[in-house]
Image (spheres, rainbow, N blue to C red):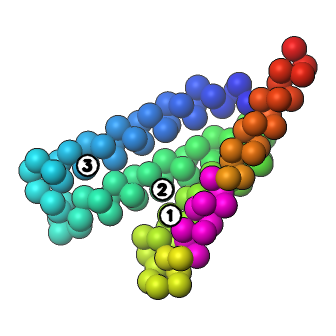
Amino acid sequence: MTETVDVQGTAIGIGILAAAAVMVYGTVVSETVVGVDTTTIATWVFAVTLAVVSLAHAFVGHYALAGGHGGAAVGLLFVLLGTGAQVAIGLLVLVLSGAYIAVVTLRLKREATAVE
């Protein structure tokens, strides 16, 4: 897990800063950018961030975390692109993926401390 900690933290940090910058722009300057609501843009940025973190985990062989983050990205895509039931499914996938990520992270941390 240590191989991806730096990349994961950096990717999430950049993603959150970019999303926050879009939200600040939406609050201070204009609520839309090229006709798209800034909240929607910020959510897209976060979905891409989760996809990048998923790829980083897959690259180093942590497929459980890759699947969890990928699932969260897909859940956000359902929320962004769906209507009605699709949005509900997206939210469910997002919550389940977040819970899965938490469980896998705790398991990996426990295994790492058992090895030391």
Name which residue lies at 60% across and 60% down. Answer: 95
Label 3: few (<14), some (14–19) or many (≥20) C-alpha neighbours in 10 Å:
many
Q: Which residues are magenta?
A: 89-98
Q: Judging from the image, what secondary structure is the residue with disc 3 in?
A: helix
Q: Is residue 82 left or right of residue 100?
A: left
The mark nearer the N terminus, 1 or 3, is 3
To which quarter of the image does residue 111 belong? top right
Residue 33 position (above or below residue 78): above
Of all residues, the one furthest to the top in this rendering is 116
Query: Does the rendering let one see residue 59?
Result: no
Q: Which percent across, then down, holds residue 10?
A: 49, 31
Identify residue type, mark 2: Ala
Identify residue type, mark 3: Val
Q: Which mark is residue 22?
A: 3
Comparing 7 with 83, the one in front is 83
Identify residue type, mark 1: Leu
Name which residue lies at 47% across and 53% down. Answer: 48
C-beta proximity under 8 Å, tags 1 and 2? yes
Q: Which residue is mark 2?
A: 47
Q: Which residue is mark 1?
A: 76
Inter-mark Cα distance, 2 to 3? 14 Å
C-beta proximity under 8 Å, tags 2 and 3? no
